[in-house]
Image (cartoon, coloured by chain):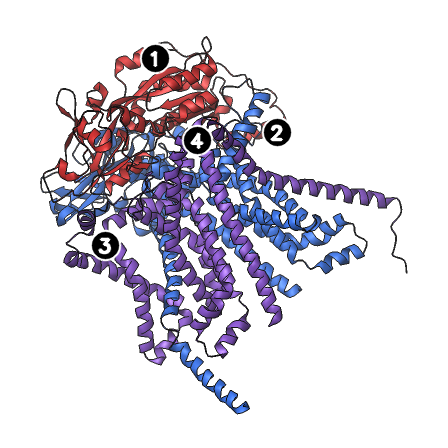
């Protein structure tokens, strides 16, 4: 394992004035023992991007702060599409995204800086199709999912499915139209679902677009005839995730094993894009952050945040990367 | 003629007496109902917030439930809902132990429960990073020592009063409902409680402590736990900065409009448009702040002064300064209008008297007019603060962060970091409710945050109302 | 007698100070006013590139949002206007002075409840509740006004001693428990009515017989939530207008034999009409621009639908969730700024109209006050 060199920050020595002593005393009183540590990492760690990964990034930040108390973590979660924008505009150096960059986004970055962004896979996740917990439906094929959520039927379904009666034999419940819930346009969840479940087709217009995955899950959990898609880590006791039929014809439930091995059809990787000029090293804060992510502790945090850790070979391969 | 009129008025009088009860009909009652309905809505909203927000901190008792199948579940009952098609009801239990079961929750149909009790030895342990454990304490191991029962409890309670770094090394042996055991290092435990064994007094104390923790601590586990102190601090700091910016400028503009500018058609037009800007949606100000302050001015500052740090932005991203400026702009009309009203109420005789005694305009303004208008200005500023504290939409564009655990004020030069992002109560609420991981677990915290925000804003508004009331009464005596 | 003269040498300094301060205030004042006006300049400037492109397709993307904005505002106004105006009429003319001095600030405090709190309650609590209890909700909307009328009717029928203890002038207060009780009654009755007359399930009936779709977060929810937010602003302004009607007018009308309600309806309302109108306009302006409530309670579906049970998407909510992701200078960025401009122009015009009408009214009152 190659270790990230930690650049030592030279401490300003002009604090040996009265104010400095007062301040040092105050800091010590506050229990801030990092003052005397010579090789501490400090600085601001800024990230802009996916709100799906918000919990994960924040927990990593907390763990990092527990180790280096002088680190200042700032994270703005407003959707994966905001990451390339912020990277190109220069408002951040770290862009967590719940989907890979599109070619256009990558080109924009290259045009601005002259080199491509560094792409790292940091965890596994899945999109789940959720229904109310008492809904009798158990399994859907991807074609059915497409027929429910899209107008284009790009995955080859014969006709659109609008009513529960098409899916179940019970006439009693659920009934009526399927009330659809999803994410807003800027989110990676929206884009990925479009690419993987709708075969790049177009969404129906009457899907409720919520500004967060938990809002989707909350809405579906309270509504008997609703169906929605959300990130795996947002599952609550109010909803149930449906099994999906993979290309071999097996119904696969979204659980840790199937997602880690990639058997579940809508499993995905979570990415972290880094603005790293060639032949330069990152500031020490960002380096410590990346080191944490690929450590054993970092991958345990992945699990605690509700995601699925990377398979070991992927993790080892990427640790070598920068 | 005279008699006739008198007779007529007599009839009219009796008609009015009658009409007060009779012919007004039911309409006034409907109108009264409107007032009552508004009150009812306000009261139920506040009650809901208070009950759900404060109730969350009460140490809830834990239940041990035996199912018909023989399984045992330990957890805190959270809510009950009806099963579809009238098949009875089911109850949701918070069971904790996420790393063992992979899930924090369990639904149990009431019909499936064969036995239900509240044993006193059930415990609830808050830990990082895995959240709550619910079950039983078997023993505590500390070096060679192995403590059980009361000795173990005493040991834990004493250890938890110390900061993490000074705690004795120790491992809790915990047993889950289905008999599995866990080894939990004492260092990662933040809270230890046995709610069923607590008396009402103890519960009240624990309740108060948890409320205090909520107010004074930072968020934990990606905003799903812990407190809101950074958000309170961020909100207050932003509002203070905003009022520091808005007060002088608002007062300056009001003095100019009312005392110096010639009162003509143009001034009237300007006055009307300033008044109207108070009605422009806050999100529009947010757009302006993003486009002009963040991208425009912030980007330029970065390229002039912080070019060595690029592409990492310093001022070219949303931050405390830009948020305060945007909100200052948003509340400027409020301050201008309030100050102008105060200025307009001062009788011209006062000004004329000052000038007649030989004062220059500056002296007249600073010695006579401004002191008289101070309460009005103050009211304006408090109203502006109240409005700014509750605004969220523009902040989403110009600088709130989901989590900024380090305060914008610290012991590092230059002490006040205007370029940092900050947390805000209102945005924290929106974020926890809509972006959080487990919305079911986050909802009580959201209620508590909402209650806090409403209380802060109501308090500010009440201050403004009382100030105005006091002011009017004083002026009534003066004039 | 000559005025006391200050020492000659100090006078120029004072005058210089005065000049300087006047200049500073003038510069500062004009600067602040210009900064405020810069908003419109910025918005227009940033939308100019759109004109250069002349892309009508992307403009078409804004039209469902504009529709959604109007629909949300309309729903809110339908809920808020009757309640706010009713409350204003009652508290200006029927309420006891003592109660009024307490109640008016309380109702105005409603305005202080932040939008994000209302939106959260509406989106996560009210919306699921209404979905499960649609029949109860609709029944409450019909039943509560009826129950108020019923209370009035009962009041006229009861003994004078009871009437004295529960006077109309305090009804705003003692109606609260009555209405709460009636709401509970409606909730208890609705499932029974649903069972017997509506075939067991209102939503199924709506779906099967009328093909009406029901979305959890819909215009009805937005209307109630945003209505709650705009009631206080309408109420406060309308109440001011009504309470400022010169008392001589009302007294005259009553002296001529009109009942209090007739005097209100025939004299006070027409006189204060412009003020009431401007109150409603300002409420509409607020409803159009409100962001967090719509964002959290509307479902954000960009549909052209007039159904109160379907979702909507507003300009302000789109700006709030999409602008941070739009790259500056891009198409979406300019489009969203166009949306902001539309909001700005709309609210500015509505408010200007309201302001002009109100000034007109103020002059009318002054005239009336001086002639009578």
**Mark 1 neighbour density, 10 Å: few (under 14) some (14–19) many (20 or more):** some
Q: Which residue is mark 3?
A: C135
Q: Nearer the viewer, mark 4 or mark 1?
A: 4
> Marks 1 and 3: same chain?
no
How far from the left and from the top, in percent, is residue B463? 53, 53
Label 3–label 2 contact, CB within 8 A: no
Task: Supply the letter of whichever chain is blue.
Answer: B
- Name the element at disc 2: helix
Q: Which residue is mark 4?
A: C324
Quick one: label 4 or label 3, which is nearer the N terminus? 3
Quick one: label 2 or label 1, which is nearer the N terminus? 2
Q: Between marks 2 and 1, how big is the CA–CA gap?
A: 44 Å
Residue extending farthest right: C1
> Marks 4 and 2: same chain?
no
- Name the element at disc 3: helix
Q: Which residue is mark 2?
A: A19
Q: Is residue A68 visible?
A: no
Task: Supply the letter of whichever chain is red.
Answer: A
The subunit letter for the residue under badge 2 reads A
Q: Quadrant of the N terminus of chain B?
A: bottom right
Q: Quick check: A25 left or right of B428?
A: right
Q: Which residue is mark 1?
A: A319
Residue at (61%, 47%) from the top-left corner? Answer: B270
How far from the left and from the top, in percent, is residue C131? 25, 48
Q: Quick check: B259 left or right of A23?
A: right
Q: Nearer the viewer, mark 3 or mark 2?
A: 3
Q: Between marks 4 and 1, how big is the CA–CA gap?
A: 32 Å
> Residue A5 occupies which quadrant of the picture?
top left
């Amino acid at each position: 394992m190659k270790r990230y060199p930690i650049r030592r920050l030279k401490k300003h020595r002009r604090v040996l004035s009265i104010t400095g002593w007062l301040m040092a005393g105050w800091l010590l009183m506050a229990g801030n023992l990092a003052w005397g540590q010579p090789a501490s990492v400090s600085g601001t760690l800024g990230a802009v991007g996916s709100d799906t990964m918000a919990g994960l990034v924040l927990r990593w930040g907390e763990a990092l702060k527990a180790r280096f108390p002088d680190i200042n973590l700032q994270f703005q979660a407003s959707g994966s599409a905001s990451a390339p924008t912020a990277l190109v505009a220069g408002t951040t150096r770290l862009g967590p995204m719940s989907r890979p960059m599109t070619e256009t986004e990558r080109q924009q970055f290259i045009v601005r800086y002259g080199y491509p962004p560094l792409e790292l896979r940091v965890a596994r996740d899945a999109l789940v199709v959720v229904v109310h917990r008492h809904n009798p439906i158990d399994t859907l094929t991807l074609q059915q999912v497409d027929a429910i959520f899209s107008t284009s039927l790009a995955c080859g379904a014969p006709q659109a499915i609008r009513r529960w009666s098409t899916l179940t034999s019970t006439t009693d419940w659920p009934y009526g139209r399927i009330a659809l819930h999803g994410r807003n346009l800027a989110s990676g969840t929206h884009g990925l679902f479009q690419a993987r479940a709708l075969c790049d087709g177009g969404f129906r217009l009457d899907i409720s677009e919520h500004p967060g995955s938990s809002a989707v899950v909350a809405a579906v959990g309270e509504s008997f005839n609703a169906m929605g898609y959300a990130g795996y880590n947002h599952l609550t006791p109010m909803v149930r995730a449906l099994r999906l039929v993979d290309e071999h014809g097996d119904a696969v439930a979204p659980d840790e094993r199937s997602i880690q091995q990639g058997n579940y059809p809508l499993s995905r990787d979570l990415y972290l894009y880094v603005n790293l000029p060639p032949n330069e090293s990152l500031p020490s804060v960002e380096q410590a952050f990346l080191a944490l992510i690929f450590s054993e502790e970092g991958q345990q945090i992945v699990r605690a945040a509700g995601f699925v850790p990377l398979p070991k070979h992927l993790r080892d391969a990427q640790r070598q990367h920068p | 003629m005279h008699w006739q009129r008198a007779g007529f008025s007599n009839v009219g009088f009796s008609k009015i007496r009658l009409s007060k009860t009779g012919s007004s009909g039911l309409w006034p009652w409907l109108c009264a109902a409107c007032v009552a309905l508004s009150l009812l809505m306000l009261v139920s909203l506040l009650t809901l917030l208070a009950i759900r927000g404060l109730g969350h901190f009460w140490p809830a008792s834990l239940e041990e439930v035996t199912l018909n199948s023989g399984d045992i579940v330990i957890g805190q009952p959270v809510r009950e809902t009806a099963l579809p098609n009238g098949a009875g009801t089911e109850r949701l239990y918070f069971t904790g132990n996420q790393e063992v079961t992979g899930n924090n929750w369990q639904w149990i149909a009431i019909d499936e429960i064969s036995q239900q009790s509240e044993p006193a030895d059930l415990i609830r342990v808050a830990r990082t990073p895995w959240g709550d454990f619910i079950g039983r304490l078997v023993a505590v191991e500390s070096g060679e020592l192995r403590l059980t029962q009361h000795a173990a409890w005493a040991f834990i309670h004493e250890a938890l009063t110390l900061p993490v770094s000074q705690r004795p090394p120790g491992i809790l042996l915990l047993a889950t409902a289905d008999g599995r055991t866990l080894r939990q290092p004492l260092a990662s435990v933040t809270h230890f409680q046995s709610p069923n064994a607590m008396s009402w007094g103890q519960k009240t104390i624990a309740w108060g402590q948890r409320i205090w923790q909520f107010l004074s601590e930072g968020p934990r586990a990606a905003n799903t736990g812990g407190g809101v102190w950074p958000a309170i601090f961020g909100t207050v700091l932003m509002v203070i900065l905003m009022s520091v910016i808005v007060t002088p400028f608002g007062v300056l503009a009001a003095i100019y409009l009312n005392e110096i500018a010639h009162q003509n058609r143009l001034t009237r037009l300007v006055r009307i448009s300033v008044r109207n800007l108070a009605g422009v949606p806050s999100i529009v100000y947010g757009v302006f702040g993003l486009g002009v302050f963040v991208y425009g001015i912030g980007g330029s500052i970065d390229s002039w002064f912080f070019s060595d740090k690029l592409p990492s932005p310093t001022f070219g991203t949303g931050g405390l300064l830009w948020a305060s400026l945007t909100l200052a702009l948003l509340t400027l009309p409020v301050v201008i209008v309030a100050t102008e009203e105060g200025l307009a109420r001062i009788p011209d005789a006062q000004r004329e008297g000052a000038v007649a005694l030989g004062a220059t305009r500056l002296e007249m303004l600073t010695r006579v007019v401004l002191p008289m208008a101070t309460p009005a200005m103050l009211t304006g500023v408090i109203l502006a603060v109240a409005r700014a504290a509750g605004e969220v939409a523009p902040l989403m564009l110009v600088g709130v962060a989901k989590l900024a655990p380090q305060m914008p004020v610290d012991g590092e030069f230059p002490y006040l970091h205007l370029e940092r992002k900050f947390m805000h109560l209102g945005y924290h609420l929106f974020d926890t409710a809509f972006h959080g991981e487990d919305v079911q677990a986050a909802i009580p915290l959201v209620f508590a945050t909402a209650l806090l925000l409403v209380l802060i804003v109501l308090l500010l508004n009440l201050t403004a109302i009382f100030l105005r009331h006091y002011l009017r009464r004083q002026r009534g005596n003066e004039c | 007698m000559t005025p006391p003269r200050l020492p000659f040498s100090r006078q120029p300094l004072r005058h210089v100070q005065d000049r300087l301060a006047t200049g500073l205030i003038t510069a500062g004042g004009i600067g602040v006013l210009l900064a405020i006006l810069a908003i419109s300049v910025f918005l227009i400037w940033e939308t100019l590139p759109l004109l250069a492109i002349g892309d009508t397709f992307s403009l078409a993307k804004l039209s469902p949002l504009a529709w959604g904005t109007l629909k949300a505002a309309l729903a809110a106004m339908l809920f808020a206007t009757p309640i706010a105006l009713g409350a204003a009429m009652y508290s200006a003319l029927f309420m006891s002075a003592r109660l009024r001095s307490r109640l008016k600030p309380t109702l105005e405090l409603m305005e202080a409840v932040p939008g994000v709190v209302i939106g959260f309650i509406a989106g996560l609590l009210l919306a699921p509740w209404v979905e499960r209890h649609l029949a109860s909700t609709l029944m409450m909307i019909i039943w509560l006004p009826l129950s108020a009328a019923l209370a009035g009717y009962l009041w006229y029928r009861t003994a004078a001693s009871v009437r004295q203890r529960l006077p109309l002038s305090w009804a705003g207060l003692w109606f609260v428990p009555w209405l709460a009780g009636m709401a509970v009654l409606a909730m208890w009755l609705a499932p029974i009515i649903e069972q017997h007359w509506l075939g067991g399930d209102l939503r199924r009936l709506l779906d099967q017989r009328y093909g009406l779709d029901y979305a959890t977060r819909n215009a009805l929810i937005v209307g109630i939530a945003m209505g709650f937010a705009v009631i206080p602003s309408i109420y406060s302004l309308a109440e001011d207008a009504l309470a400022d009607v010169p008392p001589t007018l009302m007294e005259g009308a009553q002296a001529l034999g009109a009942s209090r309600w007739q005097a209100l309806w025939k004299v006070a309302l027409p006189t204060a009409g412009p003020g009431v109108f401007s109150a409603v306009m300002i409420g509409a302006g607020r409803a159009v621009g409100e962001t967090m409530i719509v964002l959290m309670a509307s479902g954000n579906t960009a549909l052209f639908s007039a159904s109160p049970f379907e979702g909507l998407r507003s300009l302000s909510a789109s700006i709030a969730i999409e602008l941070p992701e739009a790259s500056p200078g891009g198409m979406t960025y300019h489009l969203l700024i166009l949306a902001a401009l539309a909001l700005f122009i709309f609210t500015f015009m509505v408010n200007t109209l309201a302001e002009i009408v109100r000034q007109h009214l103020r002059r009318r009152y002054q005239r009336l006050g001086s002639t009578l």
